[in-house]
Image (tube, rainbow, N blue to C red):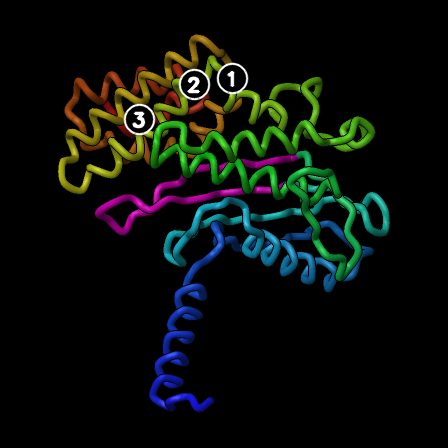
Amino acid sequence: MTIDPSNMKRLFSLLILIMAFWGAKAQELQVQVTINTPKLQTTAPEVFETLETAIEEFMNNQKWTSEVFEQEERIGLSLVLTISKELSTNTFEGELSLQSIRPVFGSTYNTPMFKHLDKDVVFTYEQFQPLEFSQTNYLNNLTSILGYYAYIVLGMDFDSFSPFGGEPYYQMAQDIVNRIPPNVAGSVPGWRSTEGNRNRYWLIENILSPRCRPFRQAIYDYHRQGLDIMHENPAAGRAVIAEALDALNEVNRSYPNSMILQVFANTKSDEIIEIFKAAPPQEKTKIVQTMSRIDPPRASNYRQQIGR
């Protein structure tokens, strides 16, 4: 049987197009990783250079959802791991700083979505050790922490585009907490309810708590109904954001001292100040009052920078 060369050429072109189409698809996260080791004296720096690359590849190449993301839709996330102690030749203690962003419709502005410092990071790592992760089984503390925050970031982002759209990813973060073996939870910090109320256990507990349900609706309203319309109607966008902040104040009443509101304030305080600097005096006064209740440590910042 002979094959027409023109048909072969068309088939080859079609194959190239199909490969290009699938090659244009991307995973969900666009992560940049920095590892700082200001106090370490024993472990060779090359170990942490290898780990930095390994974490970046792990976060960027793992398929976290069943959704299809275009390259430009990937969620920007910065991770800074600062290692403060060498507990053994291959076990380290430190803290992890995370900040994710989301583009705002009709502008070049990226709004901060999740800004958090986790001070309870302990992990074991050998140079060139592959970073392995399972959706159904606990493998190690490092990838459990990284996977947990990948799902928190995804949940927050999806919630901002559709009401409660992040639910499956928050449930996956909860599953990671539930899969931590008791002997691990007892030997490394961050996973237990008895370790105060500002750790990984409490972050996802707050997010999924019925008392914090209005928080998640407010995340959608603040971003999709507020920020995303400010390019065409700043006053209307501000009004929706003000209503969303009122809803957060109600969460503050029903769940006082909740971790998730502290995380929100840490993430959004500077943005809220900038948004309401241009508001009418009456609106400024109301926002200053609302944010001073939600975020008491920054009350003077709101008064001084937003004004009345």
Residue type, mark 1 in image? Ser
Residue 92 in percent (x, y) is at 76, 45
Give the main secondary structure, helix, strand or loop, of the magenta stretch.
strand
Disc 2 marks which amino acid? Answer: Arg
Determine the residue positioned at 20% across, 31% down.
237
- Observer-side mark, 3 or 2, equals 2
Q: Give the SS element for disc 1.
A: loop
Magenta span of residues? 96-119
Residue receiving disc 2 = 213
Disc 1 from disc 2: Cα separation: 7 Å
Q: Which mark is residue 274?
A: none
Task: Decide which of 94, 8 is in the foreground and name it.
Answer: 8
Residue 101 placement: quadrant: top left
Residue identifier under label 1:
209
> Callout 2: helix, strand or loop?
helix
Q: Name the residue tied to disc 3.
A: 304
> What separation in Å lies between label 3 and label 1 (alpha carbons)?
34 Å
